[in-house]
Amino acid sequence: MSPTSPSGRDVLRESVGGQRRDVALGSLLASGHQVGEALVPVLIGVVIDRAVTGSDTGALLLWLGVLAVVYVALALSFRFGAWAGDRSAVRSEHVLRLSLVRRVLHPGGGAEKGRLPGALASIATEDAKRVGGVNTAVMYGIAALAGILTCAVVLLRTSVLLGLVVLLGTPVLLWLGHLLSKPLEARSEAEQERAAHASAVAADLVAGLRVLKGIGGESAAVARYRTTSRDSLAATLKAARAQAFQSGMVLSLTGCLIAVVAMVGGRLAAQGSISLGQLVSAVGLALFLLGPLEVLAWVNAELAQGRASAGRVAEVLAADRDVTAGGRSLPQRVRGAVRLSGVGHGGLRGVDLDVAPGELLGVVATDPAHATDLLHLLARRADPGTGTVELDGIPLRDLDPAELRTAMLVADHDADLFEGTVRGNVTAAAPEAADPEPAMTAAAVTQVAQTLPRGEDTAVGERGRSLSGGQRQRVALARALAADRPVLVVHDPTTAVDAVTEAGIAAGLREVRKGRTTILVTTSPTLLSVTDRVALLDGGRVTDTAPHADLIARHETYRAAVLS
């Protein structure tokens, strides 16, 4: 997807251009500051010509008073101009970050494809910050141009030749600075890509730290991160060298322009074309030019980095969605009839399956990948290539994914917990004022709470890492049950619990879901034994449906899947 696709452009325009009032105010105040800075050497020249040369004490005091007023105005304009510029940058960054988070969390999905969570976090923080900073750069750029223009006008009034040197030299300097910023833009983009990848790898390693320690893979993980970190460092150093080269070259060119202004002014003074005060003003203005020209060099660098980050941000914002919202709505009362007709997706081939309202159905997939494909379709993270998946006779592709998930909840095997308490996690998706106790009892979370220091109010930490694997599974299952959806699809919810606890969960799950459609995608014989019937998914097709005991008796494939 092109980073300049309409949706990406629109959001970037809203975030950066939406702060026009602050940028305009900041530009006005900062321009006033630059104009005041440019007038200081002019006023000093006036003091020399009208007070010092003629020994006029009254005129000296008058012009010193004028200088004091100018300095007070300079201080106030700089302070409030910087405040307006920073506020516009922070607000733009905030709008952009919200847009990125909204896009990543969109029910249609797609933004996360090809990107690890750490990379998305880097884009939503560092890249968003750089794009927001474009507002500040634009403000200071306008102010610097105002200062240069003031300097040129004053020099033109002093000497046409001096004014022309500034007016003709500045555009050439800006053009050369733009050309010098091109390598920086390319290397800045590479730097952000590598930094985001390093962040993603680090987050991935931290999330899997327990597993790595369990298999003794720490050294391989460290080696992987070290390689990634070195690549990121190399990209950062290349970007830093490009920025240093660009800054150094622009500074050298700026020095050349200032030297030319000073040289021309000195010759004019020697010839008597300008007074001593005008010469002092010209030299002062030449030195003043160093400031706004350095600002323009910085602005060039900021815009180059901002363009690189804007491209990365726009790629996420404009990413194609996995599924799109249909135009139909669910009935007010969802019965919970689920039907798959001739469904083909991934490894699934012509799957036909009817789930009656209120049925507790088990699904045994001989290939775990086929179970994953089925879950993706039921959660509408993808639409089937062939056939249809229906809920109460309405194809899922005709529904808004967000609305579908209010009626059908798919609880993944590896569902994460949130930062907070045990009870807070269980009630995260529960209807308002609903009692979570039946769900907690059914999932054996009550037993877990009894072993914790503060019971249900015990903090579970990020992703529930303070709990054991079995405890996390039980809390996640209780959360799915407490959501009380008309249709619940659960994938292997008891792989980390002991046999006695699993038997209790199986009975509790059947009881708490009585009268509502439930699909258990699992190979656990304990869970399958409490289902109404089981569908055997073999070779990508449903080859048989029958009660668990009947399938055990007549299918070797089934016995191998659930009893091995």
Image (cartoon, rainbow, N blue to C red):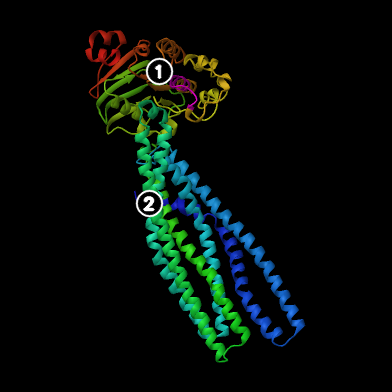
Measured along the vertical axis of the image, is residue 485 above or below residue 271?
A: above
The residue most toward the bottom is: 271
Badge number at residue 512: none
Does 474 appear in magenta?
yes
Mark 2 lies on residue = 234
Residue type highlighted by circle 1: Thr
Residue 285 place in picture, x, y as percent? 57, 76
Measured along the vertical axis of the image, is residue 53 above or below residue 410?
A: below
What secondary structure prevails in the magenta region? helix
Residue 254 place in picture, x, y as percent? 48, 72
Q: Residue at x 41, y 10 (%)?
A: 503
Residue type highlighted by circle 2: Ala
Residue extent of the magenta highlight: 464-475
Label 1 packing within 10 angstroms: few (<14), some (14-19), many (20+): many
Label 2 packing within 10 angstroms: few (<14), some (14-19), many (20+): some
Q: Quadrant of residue 54?
A: bottom right
Instruction: Say how many tags the image has.
Output: 2
